[in-house]
Amino acid sequence: MRVVVAGATGLIGTALLPLLRARGHHVTALVRDESKAVAADDTVVADALDPTAVRGALLAARPDVVVHQLTALRQMSAEAFETTARLRTEGTANLIMAAREAGAAKLVVQSISFATAPLGDPVLSEDAPLYLDAPDPGWARTVQAVAEMERLVLGTPDIAGTILRYGTLFGPQTQYDPAGPFGAAIGHGKVPIPETATGVTSFLHVQDAALAAVSAVDSDVTGVFNIADDEPAEGGTWLPEYARLLGGPPPRPIPSDVAEKALGWFANYQLTAMRGARTDRARTELGWKPTVSWRRGLASG
Ligand SMILES: NC(=O)c1ccc[n+]([C@@H]2O[C@H](COP(=O)([O-])OP(=O)(O)OC[C@H]3O[C@@H](n4cnc5c(N)ncnc54)[C@H](OP(=O)(O)O)[C@@H]3O)[C@@H](O)[C@H]2O)c1
């Protein structure tokens, strides 16, 4: 099949291109900076937020499938989250409009598994409600953009939509790379742990994220799929273990009432309330399963 990958220069995109080509697909990389090298059969150039450029790029590429791996999350700033929200709403709408015009039959789109509301079981399925009314305005905006993106993809007539809700990414060059921002802070004992750290994180290695996208491209099944490793872990489990694997001191315990101030809203939420992701649907319907658990891969970069 002819496959366009938007976000081809990203961590997941870079892992994905050779996997798709090895499956015999003709892969076109959609990039915004022509000077960045990509291992694709063809390259088209467009800023995903420019509808005219995206239209021209997809009309030139004539894809059967469009894979959307666009984020601005290499930086973890408020601006990067806002740009990512725009990529998820405007960028997705641009890709859908252009994909329809270019005659594509399928969209495979990166989403997140940890946008669910912190209600009920510690590990939730794809049917759980999203945290649209999160008390943190930045996180509410992120979740609302995710919901809008998923609505656009699943509601597009004539094009089959597959949403891959990725867990928290780890692996080389991610935030959790031992040399990355979180890895370095945790390894140096700079991340304290709230006294009740029962929030659950479902991690996902970048390579497994790319393999899930290949399964989605090759499958006739559509819908929403959580994609994460086999070991959803409470903050009280993974944070001390990650510090130990990095050779750092155990995280310093802090009382719950000062944890949000010390950690920031999201990290405190992740460690105390966030829910993990069940992946049964991806296993049974997509035929995908994770190959690396955070316990083996988190500290190896
Ligand atoms: N995915 C998530 O939900 C999430 C959440 C938290 C943290 N992270 C962090 O994000 C990093 C990896 O994730 P990733 O592979 O999803 O992201 P990534 O490596 O940042 O890749 C994003 C891709 O989107 C492209 N892009 C961004 N804006 C664009 C635009 N306006 N037009 C066209 N292309 C555009 C980038 O192109 P350029 O190369 O031109 O920039 C790049 O190819 C890790 O550090 C991870 O820890 C991800």
Image (cartoon, grey):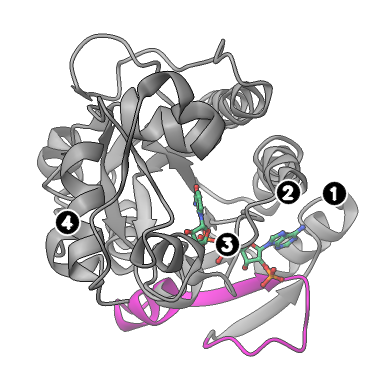
Q: CA distance from mark 3 to mark 1?
A: 17 Å
In the rendered structure, which amino acid carries the disc numbered 2? Ala
Residue 186 appears anywhere in the view? yes
**Tag 4 and tag 2, C-beta contact below 8 Å:** no
Q: Looking at the rendered structure, which numbered label has been put on residue 241? A: 4
Along the line of sight, the residue nearer the viewer: 239 or 107 = 239
* Quadrant of residue 223 within the rendered picture: top left
| First in residue order: circle 3 vs circle 1 | 1
**Tag 1 and tag 2, C-beta contact below 8 Å:** yes
Residue occupied by mark 1: 51
Q: Which residues are magenta?
A: 16-39
Local secondary structure at mark 3 = loop
In the rendered structure, which amino acid carries the disc numbered 3? Pro
Is the residue indicated by label 1 positioned so its CB lies within 8 Å of ligand 1?
Answer: no
Q: CA distance from mark 4 to mark 3?
A: 44 Å
Residue occupied by mark 3: 63
| First in residue order: circle 4 vs circle 2 | 2
Please identify the quadrant where the C terminus is shown: bottom left
Residue occupied by mark 2: 98
Q: Nearer the viewer, mark 1 or mark 2?
A: 1
Q: Is residue 263 left or right of residue 103?
A: left
In the rendered structure, which amino acid carries the disc numbered 4? Glu
Is the residue indicated by label 3 positioned so its CB lies within 8 Å of ligand 1?
Answer: no
